[in-house]
Image (tube, rainbow, N blue to C red):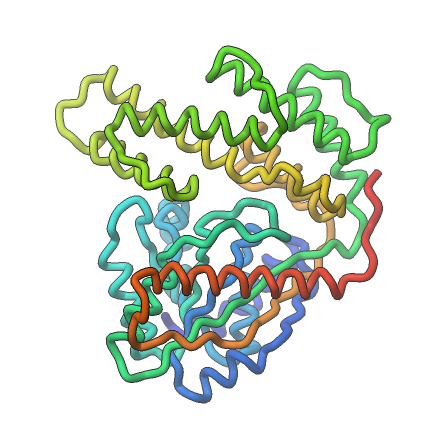
Amino acid sequence: MTPWIVKLWRPLINRELRRGQRITQIEVQGIEHPQQAIAENCGIMVTPNHSFHYDSYVLIETAHRVGQPFHFLSAWQVFAMSKPLEQKVLQWHGCFSINREAADLKAFKQSVEILSVSKQPLVVFPEGDIYHSNDRVTPFREGAAAIAMSASKKVERKIVCLPVALKCFYVKNPAQELADVMTRLEQRFTWRPRAGLPLDQRIFFYAEGILTLKEIEYLGKQQSGTLAERIQGLNNFILHQLESTYQVTSAGGIVPERVKDVRREIIKRLEQPDLTEATRRSLIDAMDDLFFVTQLFSYPTNYLAQKATIERAAETIDKFEEDVLQQAYPGIRGERHAVVRFGEPIEVPKQRDQRNAVAAMTDRLEQAVQGLLDEINASRTSHFPLL
């Protein structure tokens, strides 16, 4: 963390938000909560939903308004995908990496140390990944709560978690641009573009087509049942096979946790010397299967049907671009307005009163962030129509 460089880079960060991401306005609500916690010299963990690509840039600008720069705990892949200068910029902005596939004690200890002594808040994204279903938080992983509770137990200083919700709304209707992307996607399937159908129906039919193709690939046939049952069935089939092959005992946790356990075992085997090419190829294929399971998990089946907003349609099409067209980042299709809403701080207890204290804290943070998202959406009175 180099605070003076953070200030120096502020215009460049905001230019990327305006020009690259077309986020032309950032509205920060509840800013008194982090400012009060800083004034009270608390150790502060900020726990936002992982809402969209470059949401960390929005939080960097938010930190300027709060009055203190933020540290960021980032996946190691963020650094691996960055050029040397970009890696330095990340470090100057307080970013450090964690390997989620391993017991990364160094990153854990560094996080605890920041909460214990630093006046700058630490940002941890408990969802772990970007799932493009921004109105509905994906189950939080327990790492953030474990870090906060370890710090609270270690020091006299009060440690608080600040739940934060992030959401982007379109300022101009991107429906025609979204329809154009759907045409590209349908043509990729060798389908005739269904321009006469409403956008949400085109999205649903396309999702059904993708799922059927993957069922035939893995199962040899299409499953029966609802879309939700079919997604769950396919995920369980693939995970059960991988857990059996690599002798990983499933604790029955959420899909990302099961994926992490299998991935850890595969990485361990890939690091062994004298691998045959056939074995290495089999392990790489298994990693691809795990990536697909994560993709499949990230599609909430009734997300668009429940509330067909332009933002939900855009998020689903973003996923299609990444998963089908294999774009590193989805296209940016319209001017956007970002909302950052801080909730009241949640004090982290010094002692663990129950065996599942970390799980209980994780649930509390997840519910708080979901509540803040619901409040943001409730204040939104008008929506652009779908084509």
Residue at horizontal 52%, vertical 83%? Answer: 35
Residue at image point 57% right, 68% down: 11
Q: Is residue 116 visible?
A: yes
Q: Position of residue 221 (x, y in %)?
A: 54, 12
Observer able to see residue 13 = no
Residue 259 coordinates in the image, percent (x, y):
37, 37
Q: Quadrant of the C terminus?
A: top right
Q: Residue furthest left?
A: 274
Q: Is residue 160 above or below residue 93?
A: below
Which residue corresponds to the image point at 38% horizontal and 61% vertical from the top-left? 144
Count of number-bearing discs = 0
Hey, which residue is sitting farthest front in the picture?
354
Name the residue at the top extreme.
220
Viewer-side residue, 309 vs 4: 309
Task: Give percent across and percent down for residue 163.
Answer: 51, 68
Q: Position of residue 244 (x, y in %)?
A: 29, 25
> Which quadrant of the view contains residue 97?
bottom left
